[in-house]
Amino acid sequence: MTKFSDLGLGAEVLKAIAETGYDTPTAIQEQAIPIALTGLDVLGIAQTGTGKTAAFTLPMIERLAAGRSKARMPRSIVLAPTRELADQVAEAFEKYAKYHKLNWALLIGGVSMADQVAKLDKGVDVLICTPGRLLDLFERSKVLLTGVQIMVVDEADRMLDMGFIPDIERIFKLTPPNRQTLFFSATMPPEITRLTSQFLRNPVRIEVSRPASTNENISQYVLRIPHKDVRAKRIALRALLKTLTIKNGIVFCNRKTDVDIVAKSLISHGFNAAPIHGDLDQALRMKTLDSFRKGDLTLLVASDVAARGLDIPDVGQIFNFDVPHHADDYVHRIGRTGRAGRSGDAYLLLSQADEKNYDKVVKLIKKDPAVLELDIDYSALDESPRPAKRESSRPRARSDRDYAPKGKRDTVASYEPVEKAVAEPRKEAPATAPAKAEIRPEKPSRREKTSEKSNDKAKVDSPFGDHMPAFLLRPVTIKADS
């Protein structure tokens, strides 16, 4: 059996690896590390959870051990599609390079740029970043890419899904052509193949498993939902969770709004859960992930921002609240469990609306998940039916409004709803009571309005202003001339 000591790594790196508890490399590590140490380009294709991060981190540390960093000129770059994945790579680098004097910087959005610039000014050997923040700092002349010796692209197919390919192409063109490139991806869509053909120099292709294959250590189950009501899924999820012994698990939703709704539903029913998606503050996302890794958080309700690359070693269960729109995402989602030789369970909640996407998943993985039979009480849906939705988004007509038509309102309760007025008719006054005529003030004529304006103007023009002294108001007797 191959060990890390057989791969050509130095004593310092091997010591750091031993302290992490690993002694046997995975298939992708066993094949990629010796080639990367020679300086050749590597094209690695492996399913998620096979140890790709160490496959490029370990040889990069070994090659950068000799040399010195310069201000604003990183010696190597690691590009990651998400902030969480970039932070994970930074943690791996810090763990494996603890016995080397190498500097690194993490460049991601959502945090202070000033701290990142300060690190760049001191000089870094390894720059771990997302494409957007790297280009932002480059355009501000805070970082130069002419000294890059090693460039790593991690989760390249995820970069494609997130629309980062134009940014990746631009970054490639800004780096020296003689650099070494380590390119890793779980799948190889045509656009990724074109990118590797354009920017990699005779890469050594390493494929340890067929693209989009699921780990055999993961038991897969499907739970069919008979109701169309969207609340039925939340009821089924809670019922399923109560039947399992969960140390920690991840619930995946397709939409960010559903992430918040499902997390709130679980919390209100006594489950230890928290949401994570791209719209949340970066500090809150990192805090949530840290709590999940430490075991303080049992259920992480996530969008696909957490589906790829996140190395949380001991996730017991994966719950697909929705069937993903892209079948490949199903593989990446359930790949969060069953990592490093461990076993895991993956559950999928299947409603009638998900059948089309589910067929794509089955076709991709070439197996049918086991059907899970569970007695679930959906009676709450009949007791509290959802309010009927309006059929159209057009503005409501007058007949739909909640107040009486103009001219037919009651003079006393003029804003009383029509329904209430019909249900409780106004009581008629006693016959003996005299009818009171409604006296409305007459509107002044145009001439009277003009006169009032003239009087107001005269008052303003008066030397006394708006106040008229009392002595001027006393009656005066004028005697006729004799």
Image (cartoon, rainbow, N blue to C red):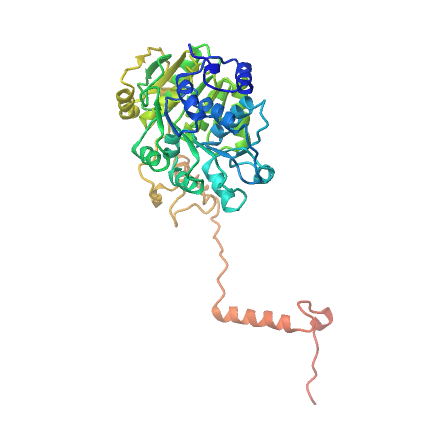
Q: Is residue 127 left or right of residue 162?
A: right
**Which residue is rendered at x = 39% and y = 47% of the image?**
408
- Give whichever of 76, 9 is nearer the camera: 9
Q: Position of residue 198 (x, y in %)?
A: 34, 38
Using the rendered view, name the quadrant where residue 197 is placed: top left
The foreground one among 158 and 224 is: 158
Res 200 quadrant in image: top left
What count of labels does the image hold?
0
**Whether residue 302 is visible:** no
Q: Would you say 303 lies left or right of 92 here?
A: left
- The residue positioned 26% from the left and 25% from the top of the image is 356
Check the image and name the residue furthest to the bottom: 482
Residue 177 visible in this rendered orientation of the protein: yes
Residue 277 lies, in percent from the top left, at 46, 30
Q: If the image is split into quadrants, where does the N terminus sit?
A: top left
Quadrant of the image containing the C terminus: bottom right
Closer to the camera, 345 or 385? 345
Percent coordinates x, y for residue 445 in the rendering = 48, 67
